Amino acid sequence: MKKAILILMATVLVGGMLFAGGGQEEPAAMEDVMEVEVLHWWTSGGEAAALNVLKEDLEAKGISWVDMPVAGGGGTEAMTVLRSRATSGNPPAAVQMLGFDIIDWASEGLLANLNDVAEAEGWDAVVPEALQKFSKYDGVWIAAPVNIHSTNWVWANKKVCDELGIALPIRSWDDFIMALDKVKASGRTALAHGGQAWQDATMFDSAVIAAGGPEFYKKTMIDLDEAALGSATMKDAFDKMDQLRSYVDDNFSGRDWNLASAMVIEGQAGFQMMGDWAKGEFLNAGQVPGVDFVAFRTPGTQGTVTFNADQFVMFEVDESLRTAQNMLASAILSPTFQVAFNTVKGSVPARTDVSDAEFTIIGKTGMKELAEANSNGTLFGSMAHGHSCPAAVKNAIYDVVTAHFNGQYDAAQAVQELVKAVASAK
Ligand code: GAL
């Protein structure tokens, strides 16, 4: 009885909220099921803490959260699970997704239409263009963007660096190599890394920029220009990957990214190259920015920002589930949620009209650099995180980068393999 009243109240509430802009109230439907099933890969401590903000927000609105976690950063495993759910005609209401994957799913015609919510709440005016490119398909809003992450960061243990006389932040690639040498000589792991394709690729994005600058990144990872892919500058990028490989410990293979963060947090390692979701992990461990850890742009990439954005893609579901699905979409885009979530997650809001007041110094810097890179033409989608080229090409690049990192090709061979792999995937 109590539950029925709650459901009715929530339905009336969302009816009024969602359609207020249109001036019409939708009749409350008694049979609405107020639950959302959400497939995601946010399973680390910092990620789970951020996701809780969303769960609690929805639960306060009378919606129960049906959790469908699939561990594995970058979302590769999650996409495999989604494929089998969709094939059996039973996709979850909402799925965490990145960039070009969204376009692939939209082209299969399986996604919901969020235009009523988007229009009522004015999403067109506040969501950055670079994100709308993936949130909309054929003019229809199909996804609710949660955040903007940037991926070219290094995370350093401050006490280890102080002890070894390493000045932070580090600016040039050569200084970075010298610092890695010092940490290695101290008997610690210099570079904490997890040998998974998306993590190798995260470092590769930065190696490409450090080798050839922002124009070279655009030519290779976005335009997929064959001459640039096969150039001496690309060999330099793979040489840089070889350098990085020499600072990784013996147990790196298959390690989850958050365990690599833990090595830095605990002082077993000096540095990690990882997107700013690592900040959520450091904060969740009680670490204080500037005191326990320092983050700086990957040396050699300053001025350029590679980004990705998590979006919750809404699948077409039974009519009875749509009110709850729309409420989830609406909750994700609300400015208060965007601040509450992103301050925990380490990302910045997916809206342009949110103040940076509540963010740490790293978050404030991130927001400022994102805006600057956007106006200077040096803001690029991350290849590693599905925002620079279609998923098939991304996977082909992953294969070469990982094979090289594991010693299957030398740098010169990797360049040739890269050219071939991209040509056959695009
Ligand atoms: C990224 C995602 C981030 C973070 C990371 C590691 O692809 O955008 O939000 O969760 O994977 O899991």
Image (cartoon, rainbow, N blue to C red):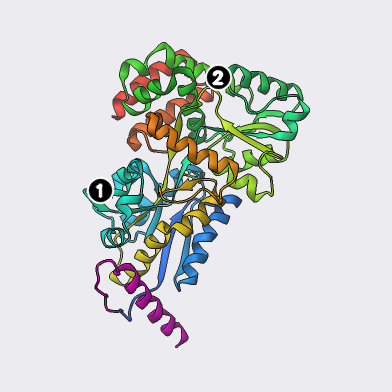
Separation of marks 2 and 1 at Cα, in angstroms: 40 Å
Q: Nearer the viewer, residue 68 or 168?
A: 168
The residue under label 2 is which amino acid type?
A: Asp
Residue 311 x/y as whole percent:
40, 50
Magenta range is 1-27
Residue 343 x/y as whole percent:
55, 51
**Magenta stretch: includes residue 21:** yes
Q: Nearer the viewer, residue 176 or 95?
A: 176
Secondary element type, mark 2: helix
Give the number of callouts: 2
In the rendered structure, are the residues bearing label 2 and label 1 in contact, judged by CB atoms less than 8 Å apart?
A: no
The residue under label 1 is which amino acid type?
A: Tyr
Q: Is residue 183 visible?
A: yes
Q: Which mark is residue 137?
A: 1
Q: Nearer the viewer, residue 64 or 19?
A: 19
Label 2: which residue? 242
